[in-house]
Structure formats: C-alpha cells, structure tokens
Image (tube, rainbow, N blue to C red):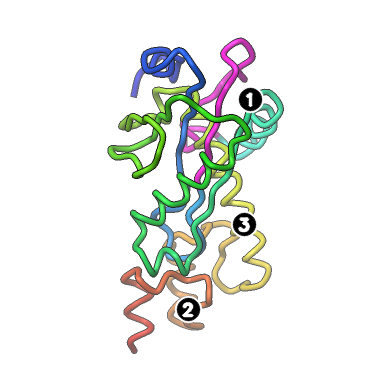
Amino acid sequence: MPESGPDFSHELRHHPGLVAGVDEAGRGPLAGPVVAAAVILRQEDCPEGLNDSKQLTAARRAVLEGEIKARALCWGIGVASVEEIDAINILWATMLAMTRAVEALSRDCAHVLVDGNRCPQWRWASTAVVEGDAKCLSIAAASILAKEARDRMMVAAAADHPHYGWESNKGYGSPHHLRALREHGPTPLHRRSFAPVAQLVLL
C-alpha cells in the first residue's frame, strides 16, 4: 500500500476524458447481496481523506459518503441479489453488480478503473488495479459508497432476522452468526452456494 495514499495518477494515465472508479463490498459474507459502486470524481473538487474503506472508521466513512455524493460528478450503485449469487457464483455476481453500478452513472465514461485483478466483460475500456482502493482516488471513493450502501442493507435486514447479529457482522461468518445459523437455520438471505450454509441445508 503506498504510504502517500491514493491519488489521481491512475486516472490521468489512462484517459483524458471521464474515468470512473469501481469497487465492491460483500464478496465474502454468508448472507446478503454483493454491492458495487462506480464514481466519477471532480479532480478540482475531491473530498479530502479518501482511502480504502477498510482503513477508515465507520464515522469517517459516513462523513465521506455524504461528501462524495455531494461533490462527485456522478455516482452509481449496483446490486446482485443472493439468488443471483447462488445461480451464477459470487465472482460473476460481483461482475454483474459492477456492470450495474457503471450503468447507473448519469454520465458515460471513457475508461473504468476496477479494484482487483480482473474486469467484467462489458462495453467500456477498463483496467484492473490490484489494491486499487489504496491507490486510486476514484476506486477509494467507490469502495466507501459500496460498503456504506451494503452495511445499511444488512442493518435493515437484521431487524427482520434478529438472531444472526447482522447489525454488527454485516453477514460475515462471525462466531455469533455461525452459532445462530446452526441454531435457527438459514434465512432467505443466506447464500446457499457458500459452504457453511450449504452444509446446514444438507443436514
């Protein structure tokens, strides 16, 4: 991870036109959708302190989410459902969520920078950037929007399924979540293609 934090060097390197950053949240949890965000920042009006969402406190992420939405040229959210995850697997569901996020932008972009090591099969020119959320400001902004959007979904879902602790674990396989899964079984929001859930379904 670069000590100086993310900057605009990747955006400037790839295209002089509009460049979007894309990242996702929720590939690893046992429950809930996978959510992606796409952001086109204004270089002349970029919020300060953007970074990989995992490096930020919840309070700081919430503040930055508001600043990104207010100051970015445009942003979009894409979601792939639990049913889609189970039907096409988490990798392709992630790619689908990313595609939907870029499609949700109100402006078309000339290039897309994608966090990770591969890009979706889509119509946009794109570049995968490993650890992009720590290197590219646009991807860092997308990582914040994606995580905040998904966290809200899981907190809301926790009200309907109170046993699993989703308000704190956000659907990841914490000891609390796994214990509740064994005691109460899977909900409609559990990913049945994921091993810990699949093993319970087969019992």
Determine the CA span between mark 1 and mark 3. 23 Å
Determine the CA span between mark 2 and mark 1. 39 Å
Q: Secondary structure at mark 3?
A: helix
On residue 30, which mark appears? none
Q: Give coordinates of residue 110: x percent, y percent.
A: 46, 24
On residue 72, which mark appears? 1
Residue tagged 3: 153
Badge 3 amino acid: Met
User: Which residue is drawn at the image coordinates 52% and 35% (left, top)?
Assistant: 142
In front here: 4 or 20? 20
Measured along the vertical axis of the image, is residue 193 above or below residue 56?
below
Q: Secondary structure at mark 2?
A: loop
Left/right of residue 93 with respect to residue 187 in the rendered view? left
Q: Secondary structure at mark 1?
A: loop
Measured along the vertical axis of the image, is residue 19 above or below residue 22?
above
Q: Which residues make up the magenta segment?
A: 36-56
- Residue at the outermost bottom position: 203
- Residue at the outermost front position: 123
- Residue at the outermost left position: 117
Badge 1 amino acid: Ala
Specify the quadrant that holds the C terminus.
bottom left
Residue tagged 2: 186
User: Which residue is drawn at the image coordinates 43% and 52% (left, top)?
Assistant: 96
Determine the CA span between mark 2 and mark 3. 18 Å
Q: Decide: marks 2, 3 in contact (CB < 8 A)?
A: no
Q: Quadrant of residue 75?
A: top right
Q: Give coordinates of residue 158: x percent, y percent.
A: 63, 66
